[in-house]
Every structure is written in structure tokens, then in C-alpha cells.
Image (cartoon, grey):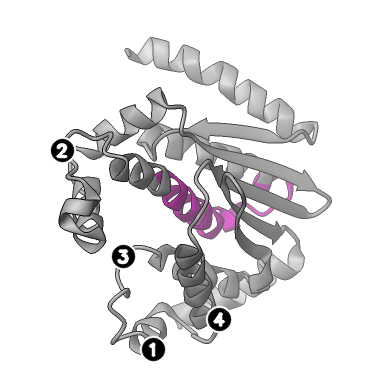
Amino acid sequence: MGPDKKREYTAPFMKYITDAVEENRDVRIITYSVSTTNENRLKKVLALYLRKRGCEVLLGPIYTCVKELLINAVKANYKHIYFEGAAPQSPAPDLLGHDKVIRLFKLEMSREDAKTLARLARSRDMKAEIVFHHEGDTLSISITNPIAMTPDELQKVRKKLADARKCDDISDYFLMNADDPENEGAGIGLVLISMILKSLGVDQSRLDIRSLEDRTMASLTIPLNRATLEHYAQSTAHAAG
């Protein structure tokens, strides 16, 4: 796609989201991957909401939270496809064992083969859906994907968040879980989100992750007010000092 066509594609989108934000309508984004284009789109939508409330300085931390939740949703879709054997290169789980297939899946995600999973997700309409809802001084963002978590996966998520609440920074979390074989990249984004919420002075209950019958939904609710701005300014000043 040449630069002129890209501009033609972007302009209607920007007008749509600008009007929606000004008119307090929800904005919905559907994606099948975490591409640079989708990241930029997500950031533009978020920036409009923050600018409306005079909270532009919060773009970095809030965007990081939303991106981490989106990554989790997209990876869950890819993992489902991989375990079904839709990817031609994926061996059957019953031949290698669950743990080995998980390791193979993570290897695929770090290689060019992730693009194959993205194409398969699109062909099966296994999307991640992001919805922005603004009411008063509160911005609510939900990220949904059509795969329910297993009870074991949900328990691990809850444990990570519970442990994160006890820590002042992410290094404390790693020290607390140094002997945990599950202490690796997957899910650490949730710990990062927990740390960011602390820096904003936002209660951890504002992050809600639940497994429903046919989907998983992660919801993040952020007050866009003076208290959040002041708490973030104090946190960043303390970190710089």
C-alpha cells in the first residue's frame, strides 16, 4: 500500500474516532494481531480520550497496560489455533506432551511463523476486540477474545495479580517467585500492569480479568482526574530521584 492510499485509509478512521470521542460514543477496534498499524491506531484513540480530559501525560502508562492486555488476548487466540493443529508445523500435543508443545508455541511466537498464526486467526475470525467507553471522568477499556480460560489458567492469573499486589516493583515480584517454574515471560505483563496502576494511585480492583462461557474479558477502568495526575507526578518524581 503506497503512502497516498495509506493517508486515504487513515483519514476516515481518524474522523470517525474524533467524532465518537467528542460525542461520547464508544469506540470499538477489532484486530487479529499486534501489528505496528494496530498499535498506532490504539495509541491514537487513547490519546484523543486523554486529551479531552487534559491527561495527555498518562498516555505512556495507560497505553502500556492496554497493549499488554491486547497481547494476552491475541496470544490466547494463537495458542488455541496452535493446539488444534491448524498450524501445519505444530506437532500433536498428545505426541509430545503439553509442556513441550507450550515451549514450541512460544518459540513460534518469537519467529516469523507468528504471521501464519495471524493469517489463520483472521480466516477463522478469531479476533481481539477493544472497546473504549468514557463516562464522566472515567475511561473504561475492555479487551475480549473468543477463547475462555481454563480453570488452571485463571488460577495462575489470579496468583500473579495477588503476588503483584504485595510488591513495590517488578523486581520484588521476581524475588518472591524465584523458585517458581512458571515464572517466565507469559503473564508477566499482568504484573507490569499492576505496578503501573500503583504508580497512578489506581486501586487494583480496577483491573478485572474473567473467563466467561465462550470468551475471556479483561477490563481496565482509569479515573482521568486531578488525583490520578498528581499521584502519577509524585510517583515519577520519586522514581527519578
Residue type highlighted by circle 1? Met
Give the alpha-carbon distance from disc 4 to disc 3, as whole Å: 18 Å
Q: Is residue 76 left or right of residue 200?
A: left
Q: Residue 110, how many percent across, how many down?
A: 21, 49
Q: Position of residue 57 (x, y in %)?
A: 58, 57
Q: Report the Cα–Cα distance between label 4 and label 1.
A: 12 Å
- Residue 47 in the magenta stretch? The answer is no
Asked if the residues shown at circle 1 and circle 3 are in contact, with their CB atoms under 8 angstroms apart, the answer is: no
Type of amino acid under label 2:
Gln
The residue indicated by pointer 1 is 176
Residue 75, percent across and down?
Answer: 38, 48
Disc 3 residue type (three-letter): Gly
Tag 1: Cα neighbours inside 10 Å, few (<14), some, or many (≥20)?
Answer: some
Residue range in magenta is 50-74
Whole-number angstrom distance, CA of label 4 to CA of label 2: 39 Å
Q: Estimate how packed mark 2 is, as few (under 14), some (14 to 19) or many (20 or more) residues with alpha carbons within 10 Å.
A: few
